[in-house]
């Protein structure tokens, strides 16, 4: 019979461990340089529309739809190469891996991300995070709705959730209560979004950057 860990750490990826805003800026620049402003703008409209349909950002799915509108433009076929070969390891925040290793002394570390089934795993692999987490990776469409499944795969007495989205932190806190400690790294565009920050008042720990986790001890935790 396996022993249930006292504590498990759940890490988001985009703008938590990895600067996804910088990746999006690079993607915009690439599309503008290779295909022009109009093509870049149209791709982004499709991307946002698809996000509304699916609930997550689907870069490759948006490319497929863009291609249907540009079936006679062979250069479109090279966008996927750029996406899949992007050097995500260069976009890890400073001390992100060290922070993961630091908290790992108190319990298992797990990636808990939203995303598609192709590009998001590729991003996690290319960044080196898949190996850093030893394959402990969970990816859902809406992770805040999958907490029973999270607990099934990674049971624990207590969880620490590290996520840049106040909405996600609030939803998980509402569901798990004292069973979870929420950590809000104020990174990426959500740190500047007043509507998003309206949900940040209830977080247990707020830090300015992921590397600040190196200053925190989780030797003691709230009793669930």
Image: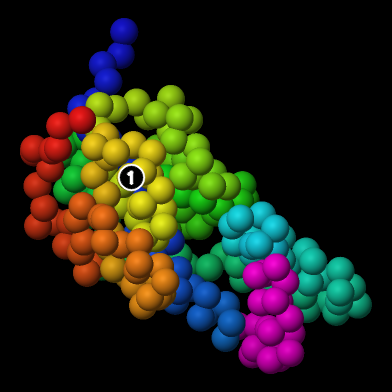
Query: Circle 1: is it few (<14), some (14-19), or many (20+) Cα within 10 Å?
Result: many
Q: Decide if residue 101 is on the left or right side of residue 123.
A: left
Here the colouring is: rainbow
Q: Position of residue 31 (x, y in %)?
A: 65, 83
Image quarter in which the C terminus is found: top left
Q: Position of residue 89 (x, y in %)?
A: 40, 63
Residue furthest to the right in view is 72
Does the magenta-highlighted stretch encompass residue 34?
yes
What residue sits right under mark 1 in the picture? 173
Q: Which residues, given as a range, are shown in magenta? A: 30-49
> Splitting the image into 4 quarters, where does residue 210 fall?
bottom left
Relative to the observer, which residue lies in front, 169 or 4?
A: 169
Relative to the observer, which residue lies in front, 56 or 27?
A: 56
Q: Position of residue 170 (x, y in %)?
A: 36, 52
Position of residue 43 relative to residue 116, above or below, is below
Does the magenta-highlighted stretch encompass residue 70?
no
Q: Decide if residue 127 is on the left or right side of residue 116.
A: left
Q: Position of residue 154 (x, y in %)?
A: 37, 29
> Splitting the image into 4 quarters, where does residue 51 fall?
bottom right
The residue at 68%/83% (across/down) is 40
């Amino acid at each position: 019979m396996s022993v249930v860990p006292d504590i498990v750490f759940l890490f988001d990826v985009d703008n938590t461990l990895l600067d996804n805003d910088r990746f999006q800026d690079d993607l915009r620049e690439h599309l503008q340089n290779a295909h022009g402003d109009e093509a870049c703008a149209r791709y982004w409209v499709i991307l946002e529309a698809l996000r509304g349909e699916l609930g997550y950002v689907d870069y490759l799915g948006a490319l497929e739809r863009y291609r249907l509108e540009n079936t006679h433009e062979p250069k479109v076929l090279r966008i996927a190469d750029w996406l899949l070969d992007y050097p995500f390891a260069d976009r890890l925040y400073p001390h992100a891996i060290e922070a993961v290793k630091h908290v790992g002394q108190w319990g298992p570390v797990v990636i808990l991300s939203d995303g598609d089934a192709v590009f998001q795993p590729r991003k996690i692999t290319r960044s080196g995070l898949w190996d850093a987490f030893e394959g402990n990776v969970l990816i859902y469409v809406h992770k805040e709705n999958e907490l029973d499944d999270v607990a099934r795969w990674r049971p624990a007495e207590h969880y620490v959730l590290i996520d840049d989205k106040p909405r996600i932190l609030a939803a998980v806190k509402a569901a798990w209560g004292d069973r979870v400690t929420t950590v809000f790294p104020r990174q990426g565009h959500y740190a500047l979004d007043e509507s998003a920050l309206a949900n940040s008042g209830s977080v247990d720990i707020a830090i300015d950057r992921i590397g600040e986790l190196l200053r925190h001890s989780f030797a003691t935790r709230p009793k669930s």
